[in-house]
Image: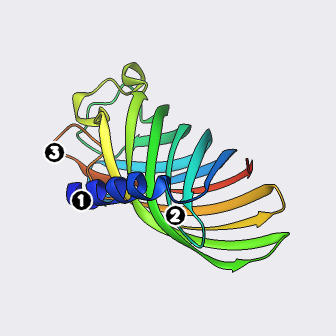
Amino acid sequence: MKKTILLLIAFAVGTTAYSQVIFNPKAGYNYSYFTGNFEDVSFEGRSGWQVGADFRFGDEFFVMLGAHYFESENRIESLGSVNLPANDVTFNIKGIRVPLALGADLLKGRRIGLRAYTGPNMNVVLDNDEDAVNTSDLIYDDIAFGYSLGVGIDLGIFTVDAVHEWGLSNVFDSDSITSKNSRIFLSAGILF
């Protein structure tokens, strides 16, 4: 994973001097869901929102680097021995998502374009409502990694993107509960 990220960064830096750069601020909706191995707790991801920007380096083939602030709501229900303050706890996760992707234009015209891209991303948790959960087993880890696959449509200066991010690392700072948090992102933006 680290080698892939370093290779993509080196490629982005190397191609910047020879290619066009597109700045794409965007905002949108996200939905999270959990996968993992847990017996005493039920996790339910819910909706949230994000705002941020991507830089695209290249023309028909491009490297995309971005930073997005996100918030998502999650629900935890105790099913057994985990010591939660209540049977049902809803809490928010706030963080920064940093995607790095390789992509290609599938269709490119003067007024419409279709793109596909894929690559790793890092999620840095800024706030996780620790006090609402009140158990060390359910405290979010500060950094989680994922892998994304996305498609985008360019309509003149406007963009619409749909991205699926699969969680690759355990989101909890605990060995007793293993869970990965995946997300679906829908966003709209403007090209500069």
Front position among marks 3 and 1: 1
Q: Position of residue 34 (x, y in %)?
A: 41, 55
What is the quadrant of residue 140 in the picture?
A: top left
Q: Position of residue 108 (x, y in %)?
A: 73, 76
Q: What residue do we see at 21% from left, 59% from top?
A: 3
Relative side of 108 to 142, left or right = right
Q: Which residue is mark 1?
A: 1
Residue 126 higher or lower than 137, as above or below: above
Describe the colour scheme in one phrase.
Answer: rainbow
What is the quadrant of residue 8 in the picture?
A: bottom left
Question: In the rendering, which numbered label is found on residue 176?
Answer: 3
Relative side of 85 to 111, left or right = left
Please identify the residue farthest to the top as the structure is shown: 131
What kind of residue is marked 2? His
Q: Position of residue 99 (x, y in %)?
A: 45, 51
The Cα atoms of the two marked residues, 3 and 1, are separated by 25 Å
Q: What residue do we see at 27% from left, 44% from top?
A: 80
Q: Quadrant of the N terminus?
A: bottom left
Cβ–Cβ under 8 Å for marks 3 and 2: no
The Cα atoms of the two marked residues, 3 and 2, are separated by 27 Å
Cβ–Cβ under 8 Å for marks 3 and 1: no
Question: In the rendering, which numbered label is found on residue 164?
Answer: 2
